Every structure is written in C-alpha cells, then in structure tokens.
Image (cartoon, rainbow, N blue to C red):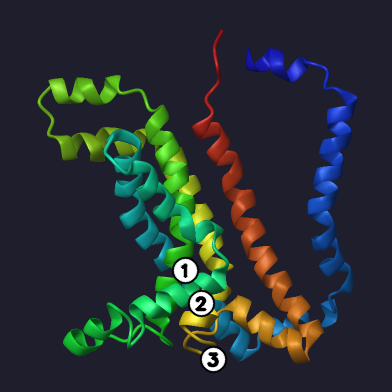
Amino acid sequence: MSRLRGRRKAPIAIVVWAALAITFFSLPFIGILVRAPWSDLPDVVTDEAVRRALWLSLRTSLIASLFAGVLGVPLAWVLARIDFPGRRVVRAVATLSMVLPPVVGGVALFTSFGRRGIFGQYLDDWFGIRLPFSTAGVIVAQTFVAMPFLVLAVESAFRQLDLRYEEAAATLGARPFFVFRRVTLPSVRPALVAGFVLAWARALGEFGATITFAGNLPGRTQTMPLATYLALESQPERALLLSLVMIGISFAVLLGLRERWLTTALPEVRA
C-alpha cells in the first residue's frame, strides 16, 4: 500500500501550495545566509564569551530535556491511560506554558520560585537554594517551557499503543512497573526520541522566560539566544553570525534524526 501511495500523481495545486509553504519557511534563513559576514565567523566562533554562552546553552538544554522526560513521561501516561475527573484541566495546565508568552512564563516562575515567591522563600530558608539569576534557574525556565512538547508527543503514542502486549506480559506475571519499563516504553521509543528532541530544541531556543527569571549574566545565565539579543542591540552583524551558529546546530540535529524517526515510527503498512 505504501508503494502504491508513492506512485499516485500529486495534484498540481497542492504541490504549488506546498512549494509556497517551504519558500515561506526558507526565506528568513536565506536572508541570514546572504547578509551574514562570513569572513568574521571564525573570530566569532572562537570568541571566549560565545563559547561560554554556547556551552551553557547546550548543557542546560540537555539537562532540561532530561528533566522534561523524567517528569513528562509519567504525566503523559496518566493523561493517556487514566480517566479521572479534571483530566482536561490537568492537560491544559501541563501544556499551558507552550502557548503562554515566554515573558509571562518567566513572571510566573519568579512569583513562585523567586526569593520572595510562594515556594522559593522556603527553598531559600530551609535549603539555601536560590533559583533566580542562577544556572539552575535557567534549567528550570527551559524545562517549564519545553516539557509540554514531550508530553504531547508521548501521550499521543501511549493512546495509539496496542495494549495486547502489555496484557500478555501481565498475564505472564510481570509486575506493572516491569511492564511499563520493558514493554510500554520500548514500544513508544520513536515518540520518546521525537519528544526529547523537540523539548531540547525548544529549551535551546528559550529566551523570554530565561531572561525574566534567570537574568542575563555572562558565564552564568547568558545562553546563546540571550547573547544574540544582546549583540543585536549594538553589533547586528555579530548577531547574524550567532544566529547562524544556532541554526546550524539545530538543523544538523534535526536532519540527522528525522529519517530515523520516520523509519522507526512509521513502519510499512501492509495491504
């Protein structure tokens, strides 16, 4: 059936609109490629401040993605498998940060986890933990805005999963957590990979919540998006090169993983 689909003649109108769509997506990147001062790229890439910002972005976004997985996968399973009162409200709360203006998310984090926040004051008094204007605060902000992408991807996979394999394992005496770890999770691995990468990409590009909650301290909270914004005010050509670095990293990761997602997540459909 999949081979038959590939042989169907595509409607010209749809192809034209698809070409317009990819053109629309491509034009902003083409603009950066044309206007960027390529001769200055080696100097910018080897600059110590840029390297610190890049390393901080990569490190914090990966940690935020791991936290998103640890917290988001169980949440996705509960939303997909358990019918409880208020499930729609819980799902809305879990994905709210995905549609909020990032600055609003930062304000919400500050009122909750700031030194005078509802919970932050106890973290400070009892454990001496101060999240605002710290690297840990960057991770919290990135996790807050990135986790919904993982939750939505994995919840959808849990809903579509054939339950017969889990039921067979349970019939053979496997405990529920063993079934979840050895049967359920491997079965939704493509969605886990996709959700993790989407969460990582969102965390890598996070700006508004980070600058509001964690500030813009070089070497401590200044990620690449913040460094790019700062350069845009006084050195626009430098901002273009920093944007190129971010685009190159994100594009390389997505390009390298996309085919693997498709071949694993979309097996051949047999007639």
Mark 1, Cα crowd under 10 Å, few <14 / some 14-19 / many 20+, is many
The mark that comes first in sequence, 1 or 2, is: 1
Q: Answer yes or no: do the residues labelled 3 and 2 have beta carbons within 8 Å? A: no
Snapshot quadrant of residue 180: top left
> Is 89 or 225 nearer to us in this picture?
89
Name the element at disc 1.
helix
Verify CB contact (< 8 Å) between mark 3 and mark 1: no
Question: Looking at the picture, how far across and down is residue 181, in whole percent?
Answer: 24, 40
In the picture, which quadrant includes the C terminus?
Answer: top right
Q: Is residue 53 left or right of residue 243?
A: left
The amino acid at mark 1 is Gln
Q: Residue at x 57, y 77 (%)?
A: 54
Residue under pointer 1: 142
Q: Which residue is mark 3?
A: 218
Q: CA distance from mark 3 to mark 2?
A: 13 Å
Circle 2 sits on which residue?
210
Q: State the image coordinates of residue 2 (x, y, percent, origin top left).
A: 64, 17
| Pointer 1 with pointer 2, Cβ within 8 A | yes
Q: Nearer the viewer, mark 3 or mark 2?
A: 2
Whether 27 is drawn above or below 58: the answer is above
Secondary structure type for disc 3: loop
Q: Is residue 269 above or below residue 49?
A: above
Query: Label 3 sits on what residue type?
Result: Pro
> Would residue 209 be seen by someone viewing this image from the given angle?
yes
Q: Residue furthest left?
A: 173
Type of amino acid under label 2? Thr
Q: Residue at x 60, y 50 (%)?
A: 256
Is 118 placed left or right of 175 in the picture?
A: right
Q: Depth-wise, is mark 3 or mark 1 nearer the camera?
A: 1
